[in-house]
Structure formats: C-alpha cells, structure tokens
Amino acid sequence: MRIAIASDEAGHDAKERLAAKLISIGHEVTDAAPPVPGKSRSDYAEQVALAVLRHDAERGIIVSSRGVGAAVAANRVPGVRAALCGDAYSAHLGAKAEGMNVLVLSLHSLVEEQAHQVVDAYLGATLAPVEVVGGLPPRRLQRVFSHIRENIARDLTVSELAQVVGMSQYYFSKLFKMSTGTTPHQYVMRQRVERAQEHLRESRTALAEVASQVGFETQSHFTSVFRRLAGATPKHYREMHQANPQVHGELEHQKSATAA
C-alpha cells in the first residue's frame, strides 16, 4: 500500500520508526513533508491530505503532538476524512465505516506498541468510499494534477489549467480552491518546491539548474519562494539533508534496503 506520512517536529523520531516498520513489511512510504532541522513545518497535515487527494498515496498517517489540530488541518482538504484515533477498534471502524483515509496519532497519548496496533488495524480495514461534495469532479481534478506534474518545468498559467478541464478561468479557480484549499498558483508553487526538494536531497545539480528544472525563471525567485515555503534557502536545505541523511529520515535508506 502507498502511504503518505508526516509529523510535526516533536513527532519526527516516532514517525521515522513507524515509517521504517511499514517499509519493512512491504508498504511504500513517502514523507509528505520532509523536515527542516530547527524549523517547525506548519503544513505537514495539509501535505499528507493533499498527497491522498492527488492519489499519490492510498492512505495517510500523521504523528503529531497536536493531534486534534492536525486532524482539523487535514480535514480542510475536501475528500479527506482525517480522525484522531487512540485504539485499534476505532481506527478499523473509522476506515471501514467512515472512509477515514488519514489517521492521526497523538504523540503523547500512545506508547509505540499501541500506536503500531492502531496503524495495523487502520491499514487492515477496507476503506469505505468517500463522497466528495463541491469543488472539481475527482476525475477533472486528477487531470489537472497530472498536467501540473508533467509540465512543472515550464510556465503554467491558470488559463492553461482551466483549459485542461474545459472551464472558464474564474470558475476553475473557484472550484480548484474548494477542492484543495489553495489557489492554482499557490498549488503550482508548492509542487515546484517539493520537486526541488527531491533534487536537492538526491543530487548535486547546480542551484540555477534546479531552479530551471522546476519551472523558475530566475534563481533569485526560486530562492525566495523556496525559503518562504520550506523554511530554508535551497543551499542550506541541501547542506542539511546531504550532510546528514538522518535529517530527512531513513525512508529512502529503508526503501533501498527493501528493494535489495
């Protein structure tokens, strides 16, 4: 199963151990909000919800010291059903009966063994269908997501995205925000930064080239947007993540070990 996982700063270590366990038993796990040391990412819950909405993941898991707040943030994304669960029965029933596609674990109220039991029950349940009310129809929304992903390196206007689904720019923008909680422009910027983060963690490509590959016309604009969304400059982000692989967790290491 494809699982998107993320945590606040306090839950980082618990998230890493849980991710390693899930990978070891065959799940494909992606950190939806790679951390920046010393910085607290406030959008970690939203990024898990968006990963589920985009179908990048089948389920989401959030580990947080502020479980209720994380559930509220994730539920702002239409089509996402997030809930804080503290026992296996609730997690199983939430997925099977309520369509809970994002599980929230409270860092301070669960011991690790109990948290793993909750996760096992959640992932073992067949997910009830989730009815999406309002916003873009799911197929059209996925078409827009795919277009953005495939064309991230070039200029993407709201007009072009609206044409992908045959709508007026005004109507498309309104429905897109209803579906994702963000404007088309904000969503594209976030996707550019997320793609850049992958490059910065995995390669030594020059920053100017990374900027170009993810659709920024200038390195200065890239740096400005990246700092605002990721909490660090591209140079600093690369230094932290490549100097210490533990910073962005053991997810990729575990994936490689599992594949081998």
Image (cartoon, rainbow, N blue to C red):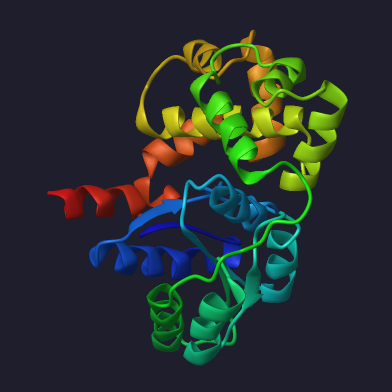
**233 vs 31, nearest the viewer:** 31
The residue under the point 44% across, 48% down is 248
Indicate left or right for 196 with 189 as reference: left
- Residue 7 vertical position relative to residue 126 in the rendered view, above or below: above
Picture quarter containing residue 120? Answer: bottom left
Instruction: Tally the marks.
Output: 0
**The residue positioned farthest toward the top in the image shown:** 217
**Residue 205 makes an appearance in the image:** yes
**Residue 232 makes an appearance in the image:** no
The residue under the point 49% across, 22% down is 150
Q: Position of residue 244 (x, y in %)?
A: 38, 45
- Residue 119 vertical position relative to residue 36 in the rendered view, above or below: below
Quadrant, the N terminus: bottom left
Q: Position of residue 224 (x, y in %)?
A: 71, 24
Picture quarter containing residue 202? Answer: top left
Indicate left or right for 35 with 201 as reference: right
Picture quarter containing residue 114? Answer: bottom left
The residue under the point 72% across, 75% down is 68
Q: Position of residue 94 (x, y in %)?
A: 57, 80
The residue under the point 38% across, 36% down is 242
- Residue 2 vertical position relative to residue 167 in the rendered view, above or below: below
**122 vs 38, nearest the viewer:** 122
